[in-house]
Amino acid sequence: NVSACDPLAFEPQRWWFPIVGRVPYLGFFEKSQALEKVADLEEQGLETYLRTAGAYSTLGYFEDPVLPSMLRWSEWTAARVILHELTHATIWLPGSVNFNESVANFVGDVAALKFLKAKYGPKSQTLERAKASLKDQKIWRILLQDLYQELSEVYTHPDFTDEFKRRQKKKLYASLPNRVQRAPFQYPNRYLALARQKWSNPRLMQFRTYNDNRKYFESLLKDCDGDILEFMKAMNRIARNHRDPVNYLKQRY
């Protein structure tokens, strides 16, 4: 999976496809082809992010594969990802990737918890570990959202030179491990390892694409009495009847 972005602005490169609309990433089955695209984008002066895709959805048009690598996942991870991809086959608004991926991530988390609760019981260690994992992920989301906001303020400041923006950008990304160490993670080592990896604008934008607007989804789920299927029906109605579902949810909640 390849994404690209302006090195001094959160302005992603986008590509248009039939059915799915405009998206901020490209998928490849061969790594060599992905690397060729990365080189081409970097020649254009863009910052790139290359990652593997754990799974993918064909939006219900075909049967989606269970990849060999998925068989090595924990039950919790597999449940979240499969339910995420099933959401894409149920709800997909062409050209609204941020909405689509964020809804799918939210549904994957909520539905996977319900699955573990039904299978192992409400007081099981398996369920408690999953809940702890989600709490850590919420902390991680907040850290990266704060980082995004600080970087955005640097990039959009009218008086900052490009050279100053580059220096500030480097400092802010380098601060991520310290932010993790100060945060109340239950399992900090995983996030410390992530924080020490190479971060960039396209990578941070990819994260936001999958982890945005949760509080509005939580409010809608509450209105549905916690019923995830009713939530899906309501979200489908909103997506069909409103050009900007997120804006509708913001006005509603």
Image (tube, rainbow, N blue to C red):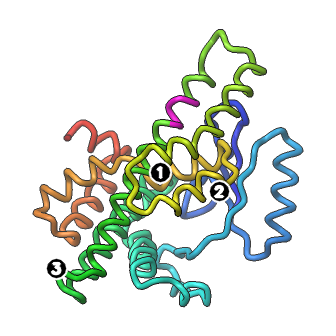
What amino acid does circle 3 point to?
Pro
User: Please, is residue 243 above or below residue 237 in the view?
Assistant: above
Residue under label 2: 25
Residue 122: give its label. Answer: 3
Q: Residue furthest top?
A: 159
- Could you tell which of marks 3 and 1 lies nearer the N-terminus? 1
Relative depth, front residue between 245 and 18: 245
Majority secondary structure in the magenta region = helix
Residue 150 forms part of the magenta stretch = yes
Residue 98: give its label. Answer: 1
Q: Nearer the viewer, mark 2 or mark 3?
A: 3
Please provide the residue range marked out in magenta: 147-151
Which SS class for mark 2? loop
Q: Check the picture and name the quadrant holding the C terminus.
A: top left
Residue 73 forms part of the magenta stretch = no
Query: Left or right of 123: which side holds 215?
Result: right
Q: Residue at x 41, y 48 (%)?
A: 212
